[in-house]
Image (tube, rainbow, N blue to C red):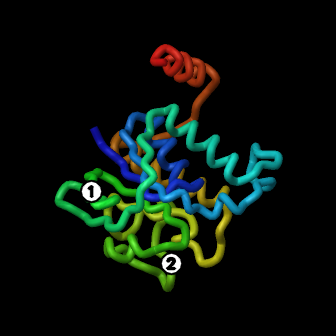
Amino acid sequence: MAHVIVVGGGPAGLSAALFTQKNGIETTVFDTDKTWMHKAHLFNYPGIGSQDGTVFLDTLRRQVEAFGVERHEAEVTDVSASDDGFTVTADGEDHDADYVVLATGANRGLAESLGCAFDGDVVDVGVTMETSVEGAYATGAMVRAEEWQAVIAAGDGAAAALNILSTEKGENYHDFDVPGDADEVFSAMADEE
C-alpha cells in the first residue's frame, strides 16, 4: 500500500491528507501546531460564514482523524529522497513514505534540503503542486510570493493529493462524491466504532 507523509497541519496539509486517506492511501501528518491559522478569523472561506481559525482547524483535524489519518505533533527536521520514496525525520525518528507533501507555510527549508528547484524565493511547482523532485509536492505559502490565503492553500493540498491519487490509480482520478457515497462512508465509519 502506498504511503503519504504530509509535513504541516494547516489548510494545505490537512486537505491533502483528507483527500489521500479518504481515497485509500495511508496518510500520516506531522505538525508542530504553529500554523498562522491560529491568528486568523475566516469569513471569506466558502461554506464558512464566520469562524475562528483555531475552531476551523479543530474541525478539520477531527475530520481527517475520522477518516484514519495518523497525526503526530512533531517537528520534521529532514526530508530526503531514497531509492523507493522518501525518508522523513521527525523528533529523531525516521519514517518512510512513497510520497511527501510539504505544507510548512513560508518555511521552505525542507524543500531546499530535499533539492527542490526554486523560482526566485518560492518553490517551483506545476499545477499539480509537484516539485522538481518526483513524488514530492509543495503547497500553500511556500509556492507563492506573499499570496497567502487559506482557500488557496487548501486547493493546493487538494491538487497535490489528486495528482498522487492519479499516479497510484494509473488514470486521472476524480474525487467527486454524491449523497449515496456519504451515506456509505459514514455508515461504515459508524459500524467501525
Furthest-top residue in view?
191
Residue 80: x %, y % from top left: 27, 66
177 and 171: which is toward the camera: 177
Furthest-left residue in view?
83
Residue 13 visible in the picture: yes
Residue 66: x %, y % from top left: 52, 32
The residue located at (26%, 59%) in the rendering is: 87
Question: Is 73 above or below relative to 186?
Answer: below
Q: Is residue 166 left or right of residue 65?
A: left
> Which of disc 2 and disc 1 is earlier in sequence?
1
Residue 149: x %, y % from top left: 67, 64
Q: Which residue is mark 2?
A: 122
Q: Which residue is mark 1?
A: 93
Question: Is 91 above or below relative to 106?
Answer: above
Crowding around mark 2 (Cα neighbors within 10 Å: few <14, some 14 to 19, many 20+) is: many
Crowding around mark 1 (Cα neighbors within 10 Å: few <14, some 14 to 19, many 20+) is: few
Q: CA distance from mark 1 to mark 2?
A: 28 Å
Q: Is residue 122 left or right of residue 52?
A: left
The residue located at (56%, 43%) in the rendering is: 61
Quarter of the image with the N terminus is top left
